[in-house]
Image (spheres, rainbow, N blue to C red):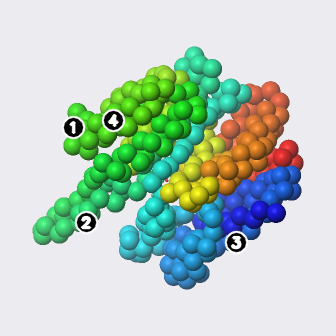
């Protein structure tokens, strides 16, 4: 039986409880589809700091390196120990470090508003059309997050100068553009590339390179949009979008905005992919939402983003498309049969049943 090695890094806040449900669902697919998942837990984030005084302990990195993919929860607790230097905080020392370490340049964030959850979407019904279905493809290892110089200079007299640098090279733009065009080919064949070409050098290069790469994909309709307009269009007419291609920071911002349209950040999974090796792609899978410390440990969190992230892992890293689809349709089924965590619950919805994290995981696993 084929075995896949997975590092499970639950992290902080709601991470452990949603991870538990995702693993429950994975175990159900394992039974049904006859493969073996070798899942190893490892501490990360504040859990890593508590364990080994490092947000990404060496043992954790080691386990990741020996694995075929990483299933990640979430890290970062803003209110814990503000004295820790910023370079050692979980966001930078664990999350950004892992992205860079494993060359995870392609971040896929699929936003889907199921019709039945239209009440959870902040937009008026008539703007939702036949349902919102957008894939945000975000470049993840370049741009302002990593560009050098990156520093704060002391100007004296209590004044400082903070510098972040936006840098992109042609090859970096090319490889993410290919990912986006290929994704569009499997969807509605429309790609909107986001940039700020009216102001930024980066935007001009981005637009040129994406246009050139697009020549290889004549079946995909390409258009370009300035990021500010893109943010507005998401609110005005989200149904015009199929795939949105963004550099790192624009993608960070627009994917949260798009996530809100999908009903809840608690529903948005993500895949961060590196290079493909044979028929396996090393990938990092995480819910797009954060640690949500205010609801952590209370059985309130929506585990669906984590569960759908596990489905993306089966598909993109292991090619287990049937098992991935089974999870996605089980989620759909659970929603259609009225299961609702608090974030997607409305007292006005007939047949909706408010349940907790664990019960949502149970319902989805049972369908699988
Ligand atoms: C995300 C998050 C991260 C990012 C933070 C936690 C560093 O917002 O994955 O979207 O900015 O990339
Ligand atoms: Mg973000």
Q: Position of residue 302 (x, y in %)?
A: 69, 48
Q: Residue furthest bottom?
A: 52
**Res 114 visible:** yes
Cα gap from disc 2 to disc 4, whole angstroms: 34 Å
Circle 4 is placed at which residue position? Answer: 212
Choose top left, top right, bottom left or bottom right for residue 125.
top right
Cα gap from disc 1 to disc 4, whole angstroms: 20 Å
Circle 3 is placed at which residue position? Answer: 40
Nearer the camera: disc 1 or disc 2: 1
Cα gap from disc 3 to disc 1, whole angstroms: 47 Å
Crowding near the residue tagged with mark 2, few <14, some 14–19, many ≥20 C-alpha atoms within 10 Å: few
Choose top left, top right, bottom left or bottom right for residue 149.
bottom left
Decide if ligand 1 comes within 8 Å of the CB at mark 2.
Answer: no
Nearer the observer, 52 or 105: 105
Circle 2 is placed at which residue position? Answer: 151
SS at mark 4 in the image:
helix
Crowding near the residue tagged with mark 4, few <14, some 14–19, many ≥20 C-alpha atoms within 10 Å: few
Cα gap from disc 1 to disc 2, whole angstroms: 23 Å
Question: Could you tell whether 162 is left or right of 330 in the image?
Answer: left
SS at mark 2 in the image:
strand
> Does residue 6 sit above or below 239 in this rendering?
below
Query: Which residue is at 84% across, 56% downward?
Result: 34
Q: Position of residue 86 (x, y in %)?
A: 38, 69
Image marks 3 and 1: residues in contact by CB distance under 8 Å: no
The disc placed on residue 199 is: 1
Q: Earlier in the sequence, mark 1 or mark 4?
A: 1
Image marks 1 and 2: residues in contact by CB distance under 8 Å: no
Q: Earlier in the sequence, mark 1 or mark 2?
A: 2
Q: Position of residue 185 (x, y in %)?
A: 54, 32
């Amino acid at each position: 039986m084929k075995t896949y090695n997975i590092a499970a890094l639950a992290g902080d806040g709601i991470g452990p409880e949603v991870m538990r449900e995702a693993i429950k669902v994975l175990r159900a697919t394992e039974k049904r589809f006859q493969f073996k998942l070798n899942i190893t837990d490892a501490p990360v984030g504040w859990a890593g700091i508590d364990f080994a005084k490092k947000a990404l302990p060496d043992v954790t990195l080691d386990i990741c390196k020996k694995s075929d993919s990483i299933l990640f929860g979430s890290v970062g607790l803003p209110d814990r120990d503000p004295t820790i230097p910023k370079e050692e905080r979980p966001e930078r020392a664990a999350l950004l470090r892992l992205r860079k370490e494993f060359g995870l340049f392609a971040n896929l964030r699929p936003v889907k508003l199921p019709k039945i959850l239209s009440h959870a979407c902040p937009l008026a019904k008539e703007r939702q059309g036949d349902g919102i279905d957008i894939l945000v493809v975000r470049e993840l290892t370049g741009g302002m997050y990593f560009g050098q110089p990156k520093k704060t200079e002391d100007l004296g007299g209590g004044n400082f100068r903070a510098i972040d640098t936006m840098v992109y090279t042609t090859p970096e733009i090319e490889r993410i553009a290919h990912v986006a065009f290929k994704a569009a080919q499997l969807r509605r064949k429309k790609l909107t590339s986001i940039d700020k070409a009216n102001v930024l050098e980066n935007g001009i290069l981005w637009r040129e390179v994406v246009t050139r790469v697009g020549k290889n994909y004549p079946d995909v309709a390409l258009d370009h949009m300035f990021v500010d307009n893109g943010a507005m269009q998401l609110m005005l007419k989200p149904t015009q979008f199929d795939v949105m291609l963004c550099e790192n920071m624009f993608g960070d911002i627009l994917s949260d905005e798009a996530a809100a349209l999908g009903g809840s950040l608690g529903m948005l999974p993500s895949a961060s992919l590196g290079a493909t090796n044979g028929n396996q792609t090393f990938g990092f899978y995480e819910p797009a939402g954060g640690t949500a410390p205010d609801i952590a440990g209370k059985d309130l969190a929506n585990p669906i983003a984590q569960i759908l992230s596990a489905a993306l892992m089966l598909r993109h890293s292991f090619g287990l498309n049937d098992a991935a689809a089974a999870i996605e349709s089980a989620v759909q089924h659970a929603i259609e049969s009225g299961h609702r965590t608090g974030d997607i619950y409305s007292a006005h919805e007939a047949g909706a049943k408010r349940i907790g994290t664990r019960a949502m995981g149970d319902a989805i696993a049972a369908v699988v």
